[in-house]
Image: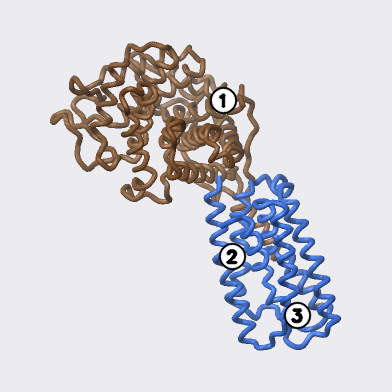
Amino acid sequence: MDSSLAVVLSLVITVNPVAICWSNGPTPVEKKQLRIAVFAFLSGCLFGLGALAGGIFDLLEISSPTFRLGAALVIGLSCGKWLVAPKFAPIRGNSNGDSLHIILHMLSPGPVFAAIAGGGDAGILPLLLACTILLFTLGVATLVTVVNIYIRDAALRLFGGSGIVLAVIIGLDAARTV
Amino acid sequence: MKQKSYRIIAWGIIWLLTIGSLRATLLAAEICPASTKEELHLSAIEAANWISQNQTDDGRYLYEVKISETGSPILSDGYNLVRHAGTTMALYQMVEAGESQYLGAADAGLEYLLDRSVGTGEILAVAEGSANAKLGTASLLAISLIKRRAATGDSKYDQALHKIGNFILAMQREDGSMLYFWDQQTNSPVPDITSLFATGEALWAIASLQNLFPERDWGKAAFLTLDYMATQRDEDENVWPRPWADQWATYSLNEMSEWGLSEIHINYARELASQFGIAVRWESQRNGGLDGLVHSPEPIAAGQGTWIEAIGMLQQLAESDPRLEDLKGPLQDRLLCAAGRMRMKQTTGTGIVEFDGGWFTGGVSRVDGQQHALSGLLFASSSLDE
């Protein structure tokens, strides 16, 4: 898989917009605006972490493909939870609670490892593109209201399953890298 | 508020568990000691000293030594003629690299092989007594003779080289695969028995023969076997993971680098590079801590030596073929990492000739450990020229 495509997919899938954008009930416009601002900040944080990939690898004394091998495991496990337990940590519609949930979710090991692995493998520009696409996806998902629990569960599981497949692809690619 | 605190604590615990468990396993530090060109070359010299100083008067090498409970050497009775030929080849690599003091030891090792030459007027192979002659011994003998010729300019063994080439061609099947044994009683190859190791050794020999004697056109046979190794060999030999990490294939690819390698061959080189690359990365994470749970057991020196040889050859191939341009940097990194680690593991300063210059795994050192490591260290050292 092309490394630029891998960083885009791994970021969007590990963040899983369905898990943090689709509320149980209607969300006021102001709350949506706040949420998008939080998304923008956190996407910037992920970009920053990915941009520091080289320094992080030096600090840990590991090579980029070795980090990707570890990242594949983290991505697989973090996406696996969506497949097994799609109702994990639902949005409550409370502003403070939502923001904390979004921060803890987007800065959890899955997205962070995906950003660093992608930044180290694909480079700054593909990472910037991936973070921009991630922000756009989160924005679109925030504007869409889906209250049907079955559709939400199915979408969560789809992201979870895709993440596991992607983790296998990234892991195999890392193992086949010099 | 309380629930928020719980969530933050849970988030922190998840991070700690993730980082901690990965750091102890998959993300353990890759320790790559830095080495200068001189340090790597000196390490190769120490290995060559182990080989030459433990050689007996008839040219036979010390095959295997164990460290006893009291710390004294215990010599093994076993011997392997293929490994003898490989060790002789490695000594000639040293001579070719300018270390002419090993010519005497290499020539003695060569005579040991030639004293055991068998065959007809047209072919030459090597065997102990009436045993079957092995393809690998003859192939490595051929390369030894070619290296000797390159280092000394002496062409007295050219006739022998032609005969060994004829022997290798007689062992080649129509699909490019190679038979392993030659039956001295019937003067013909033993059918249906092949060898994972010998096929690549034979390919390197005939590719080298083509470059030395282009008028004989060994190239067609070489391409036939290279195609077989790149596309069919792993399936026939039922090896996994594929491709089989064959350092002889990398010597061959490098020998054939000016012949117009196809995309299939270049892809094969890429796949080999990834096999050896991850082997080096994985081993470099084995540093005596919890990482040992995942990264053990330590491969023997011969195994680690072949990785350095292979990466050295692939690095040279990447230097000459622009299609592998993107691998030059990573291959150089792995080459120096593996060579640096090998240098640090070498036994030195004991004052015991059977120990100094060798690599011991589990208290045992075998001659092919020194052979492969020596070759790899030479390549790593020469890579620092550029």
The quadrant holding residue B211 is: top left
Q: Give the distance between the C-alpha atoms of the residues marked 2 and 1, in whole angstroms.
A: 42 Å
- Residue situated furthest left in the rendering: B186
Question: Residue sitting at 79 percent across and 62 percent down?
Answer: A44
Work out whether residue A100 or residue B302 is closer to the camera in this orientation and state it: A100
Name the chain letter of the residue that bears numbered label 3: A
Name the chain letter of the residue that bears numbered label 1: B
For badge 2, the amino acid type reads Gly
For badge 1, the amino acid type reads Ser
Query: Which residue is label 1 attached to?
Result: B382
Crowding at mark 3 (Cα within 10 Å: few <14, some 14-19, many 20+): some
| Residues behind callouts 3 and 1 on a single chain | no
Task: Give SS at disc 3.
Answer: helix
B38 sits left or right of B260 in the view:
right
B140 sits left or right of B319 in the view:
left
Chain in blue?
A
Q: Of the numbered discs in the image, which one, if any, rests on residue A143?
A: 3
Q: Are marks 2 and 1 in contact (CB under 8 Å)?
A: no
Crowding at mark 1 (Cα within 10 Å: few <14, some 14-19, many 20+): some
Among the two numbered marks 3 and 2 on one chain, the one whose residue lies closer to the N terminus? 2
Location of the C terminus of chain B (image quadrant): top right
For badge 3, the amino acid type reads Leu
> A130 above or below B356?
below
